[in-house]
């Protein structure tokens, strides 16, 4: 039987070209993490399903429609992580980080999974990076998280960035606003999409996050949550905006921004890039404050704030805008060519000696033809070629050819590494 296996729907292979862009994004994240003293965390890809049901929200699209869940042989309900924050909070509680100096600053970069309809730039297995700060309620933390993501995107070459921002208040503010919103929506529910008609009773705030055009039109006249904030939440938001003003970060107040996760309290934000024609390309990053999540998952009440961004979307934009693939710094300056069985065996040892000395050497040990190997060396544009033939191998010698001039010398095999290191140093 001729079986033809393919990747699962919505998942794809990643090759070196894609990883080059992923590495570029990761390098920017690592640089920013060092600057702001965030430490790396990697949580398991599988987590207890309940942390997403309780944390992300039972009535969110992620939990209702998009999670990859399974029951283990031992009866455990597990889920491939659809997002990063609940797993980080679980780790924070489990590993006693409540006792560490505050804030506890963590960042991650890795794969996530959501069973949603595949489309351009949206996959069922995808990658995100995120930064989480736990333990401090001051809005300066919100401003720092926003600044970090703004800086990462700027470092990657994005321009004309704009922060869309809102406050959803605390649980009491949300309860008061929910009543006002439901009163507004009841008389207009016939114009809503099927999902939003169901959301009116379960989670009306999610209607504000719906991307359906008819729901977008209806929400424009809806009450604004900022008008229902208590004094504490109002002051928190006011102070945050003053911090953003002081930093000079461009922002726009979006009174209907709520984002699609139940755990957000107070600050929510998204970062966009306005293109030259004035059209936004979709949110590049987003997040907010989640002061209730640690308690919801069994820990002590702990204020926290964080955000995440999709690597595939950012990498795709970088790839589209760069006129040529990411150029790798040239590191192969020496090529090892060999002819004959004895020379091939000697070459294995010589190659390892160069590797241990930190000199990257190109090779084609699978080829027997010297001319074929020299063509490869020429293609690599190396400075020196080491030629080890049958005679040289027996005499414990090697020929060093300078490719630019064609000059060549014979040196003892034992001295080859040091000789090449000296010549490379001179050629800098």
Image: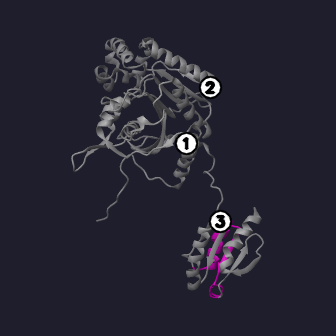
Name the residue located 65 percent from the left edge and 56 percent from the top edge: 329
CB-based contact (under 8 Å), mark 3 and mark 1: no
For residue 221, side relative to residue 326 (left or right): left
Q: x%, y% of residue 184?
A: 36, 12
- The verdict on residue 353 being magenta is no
Name the residue located 33 percent from the left edge and 13 percent from the top edge: 179
Q: x%, y% of residue 375?
A: 65, 72
Numbered badge on residue 29: 1
Name the residue located 48 percent from the left edge and 15 percent from the top edge: 234
Q: x%, y% of residue 157?
A: 62, 39
How far is mark 2 from mark 1, CA to CA? Answer: 20 Å
How far is mark 3 from mark 2, CA to CA? Answer: 47 Å
State the SS at label 2.
Answer: helix
Q: x%, y% of residue 148?
A: 56, 34
**Above or below, comparing residue 404 to residue 7 in the picture:** below
Location of the C terminus by quadrant is: bottom right
Residue 309 in view, yes or no:
no
Name the residue located 62 percent from the left edge and 22 percent from the top edge: 246
Count how many numbered circles sit on residues in the image: 3
How far is mark 3 from mark 1, CA to CA? Answer: 31 Å
The image quarter containing residue 397 is bottom right
Residue sitting nearer the eye, 393 or 403: 393
Disc 2 designates what residue? 247
Residue 370 in view, yes or no:
yes
**Above or below, comparing residue 122 to residue 238 in the picture:** below
Numbered badge on residue 380: 3
Location of the N terminus by quadrant is: bottom left
Q: Give the residues in magenta.
A: 368-394
């Amino acid at each position: 039987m001729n079986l033809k296996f393919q990747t699962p729907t919505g998942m794809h292979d990643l090759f070196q070209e894609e990883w080059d862009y992923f590495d570029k994004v990761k390098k920017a994240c690592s640089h920013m993490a060092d600057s702001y003293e965030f430490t790396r965390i990697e949580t398991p890809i599988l987590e207890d399903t309940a942390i997403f049901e309780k944390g992300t929200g039972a009535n969110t699209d992620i939990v209702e429609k998009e999670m990859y869940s399974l029951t283990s042989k031992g009866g455990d309900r597990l889920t491939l992580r659809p997002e990063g924050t609940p797993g980080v909070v679980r780790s924070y509680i489990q590993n006693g980080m409540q006792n560490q100096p505050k804030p506890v600053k963590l960042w991650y970069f890795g794969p996530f999974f959501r069973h949603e309809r595949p489309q351009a730039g949206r996959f069922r297995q995808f990658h995100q990076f995120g930064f989480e700060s736990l333990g401090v309620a001051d809005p300066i933390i919100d401003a720092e998280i926003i600044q970090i993501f703004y800086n990462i995107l700027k470092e990657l070459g994005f321009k004309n960035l704009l922060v869309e921002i809102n406050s959803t208040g605390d649980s009491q503010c949300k309860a008061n606003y929910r009543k006002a919103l439901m009163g507004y929506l009841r008389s207009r529910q016939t114009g809503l999409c099927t999902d939003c008609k169901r959301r009116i009773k379960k989670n009306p705030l999610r209607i504000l996050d719906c991307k359906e055009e008819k729901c977008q039109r209806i929400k424009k006249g809806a009450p604004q949550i900022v008008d229902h904030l208590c004094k504490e939440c109002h002051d928190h938001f006011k102070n945050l905006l003053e911090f953003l003003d002081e930093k000079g970060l461009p922002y726009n107040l979006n009174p209907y921004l709520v984002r699609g996760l139940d755990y957000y309290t107070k600050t929510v934000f998204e970062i966009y890039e306005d293109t030259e024609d004035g059209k936004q390309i979709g949110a590049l990053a987003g997040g907010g404050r989640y002061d209730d999540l640690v308690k919801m998952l069994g820990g002590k009440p702990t204020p926290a704030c964080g955000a995440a961004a999709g690597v595939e979307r950012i990498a795709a934009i970088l790839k589209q805008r760069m006129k040529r693939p990411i150029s790798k710094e040239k590191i192969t300056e020496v090529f090892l060519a060999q002819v004959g069985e004895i020379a091939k065996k000697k070459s294995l040892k010589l190659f390892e000696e160069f590797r241990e000395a930190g000199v990257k050497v190109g090779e084609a040990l699978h080829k027997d033809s010297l001319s074929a190997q020299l063509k490869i060396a020429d293609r690599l544009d190396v400075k020196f070629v080491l030629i080890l033939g049958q005679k040289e191998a027996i005499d414990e010698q090697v020929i060093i050819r300078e490719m630019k001039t064609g000059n060549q010398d014979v040196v003892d095999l034992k001295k080859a590494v040091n000789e090449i290191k000296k010549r490379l140093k001179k050629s800098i």
